[in-house]
Image (tube, coloured by chain):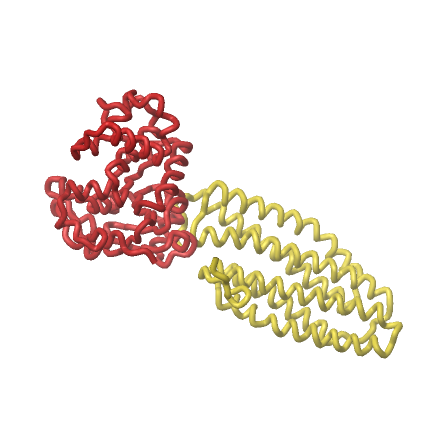
Chain colours: A red, B yellow
Amino acid sequence: MAEDKIKVADLNAWFGSHQVLKDIGFSMSEKTVTAIIGPSGCGKSTLIRCFNRMHETVPQARVSGQIQLSGKDIFREDPVRLRQRVGMIFQKPNPFPTMSIFDNVVAGLRLNGVKDKSRLEAVARQCLIKAALWDEVKDKLKDSGTSLSGGQQQRLCIARALAVSPEVLLMDEPCSALDPISTARIEELIHELRPNYTIVIVTHNMQQAARVSDFTSFLYMGELIEHGETKQLFTNPREKRTEDYITGRFG
Amino acid sequence: MQGHTDTHFEEELRDLKAEILKMGAIVEEMIARSTQALVARDSHMAEEVMSQDPEVNQLEMGIDERCLQLLALRQPAASDLRFIILGLKISKDLERMGDLSVDICQQVTQLNLEPQLKPYQDLPRLAATAQRMVKQALDSFVKRDAELANQVCEMDDEADDLKDQIFQDVVTIMQKETEAAARGVRLILVARHLERIADHATNIAEEVIFMVNGKDIRHGGAKLRH
């Protein structure tokens, strides 16, 4: 069994006085894909935003409990450094609108002070290949990132996240704005990235969770109802509330 | 269990269940009437049973199509998925039971052309056991009762023992009277068909247990890890 990449214990999170996460505890092994499912407002996005300490950036938001990344407390780490190790992909593709495709990919490296042109080019090429976008953009790297289709933009954002060599990729409904073909490309990409990264994906699409993940966590009203192997959870869940949710029995 | 939020899906699952029960009721009747035709030496009844087979075949195809559509269009999970998988399997078992009833009736019509070889004792008992198993397996499906299904699996040994006893008795007669050979073989075939019906009832019971609690108990529940 691979070692725990992310370990969560007694995690609580609030927006003001409203508690959105309640005593969450579970672990994710290294180089696995974990899907987080649950109805709107159950705390899925808040949970993954705790993993890179983005939740705390919201005014009035706070968090308690423990999250360890490779055995080390993330709350003792510099948030900027943490966010390099834990990259994030959002629901809506968000390439930097004034930058070219190339500049988008290497933006993080440049922020870190890398200036060597040949290194930047090598990383951009490598990350665009990893993000399965290279063949489509190799002849127009100077074009604006926003000139690409939605699906291509999302892969560009994945390439941008990969450029700073993260260990974990958080994906918050990465396909909800994409058509089925672009969705299939992203899902294929998740399979390709799995041997090298620990991936956490929030999705409303349960078939997507079933297709791409090794493990699934079901959250309901801020509580972790069930966490287990995806193939078990989707064929024979342990908890009745999981069964009711995945079979569409919630009123 | 609470109904699905999507009432159309709920209705489709209900229709599938109704179709399975309809097929089950027809096959149950075919089995009962085929054994009645045997014991009462009623060739007319045997012919009637044989005429029911096309309807069962049509129901099998209809159920399979419903299951295929539900899988493709609804992408079911958990107990819904297990129920639809059961639908695909149960229709096969029921169709085979229908065929076996027809096979019994074919033997009955031939047996009735000649004098009865011996008074039937164990054969009606085997038929009654097989019928009880089929009825209980279908009841366990309706009630989603794994315990009831488990009892069906336990009855399978009884059916096997009765079949062995019949084989032995008929072979003994055949050894003594060579002119009894043709009728003896037919009786052995009837016993074999009844025992196979009991096996299919056991299959249904095992499938019900999987549907209810997700446990695969077939072949002692042993599964090789890949």
Residue A166 visible in the current orientation: yes
On-image quarter of the N terminus of chain B:
bottom left
- Please provide percent x and percent y for residue B119: 79, 76
Query: Does residue B206 appear left or right of residue A18 in this picture?
Result: right
Q: Quadrant of residue A135?
A: top left
- Give the residue at the far left of this rendering: A60
Q: Classify B128 as above or below A23.
A: below
Q: Quadrant of residue A105?
A: top left
Task: Work out whether residue A185 or residue A159 is closer to the camera in this orientation and state it.
Answer: A159
Task: Work out whether residue B34 or residue B166 is closer to the camera in this orientation and state it.
Answer: B166
- Please provide percent x and percent y for residue B10: 45, 47
Task: Work out whether residue A147 or residue A80 is closer to the camera in this orientation and state it.
Answer: A80
Q: Classify A118 as above or below A58.
A: above
Q: Residue at x 38, y 41 (%)?
A: A192
- Please provide percent x and percent y for residue A211: 41, 45
Q: Residue at x 67, y 67 (%)?
A: B195
Task: Work out whether residue B60 or residue A209 is closer to the camera in this orientation and state it.
Answer: A209
Q: Residue at x 24, y 38 (%)?
A: A164
Q: Classify A78 as above or below A223.
A: above
Q: Quadrant of residue B153?
A: bottom right
- Please provide percent x and percent y for residue B69: 53, 42
Query: Does residue A63 appear left or right of residue A41 in this picture?
Result: left
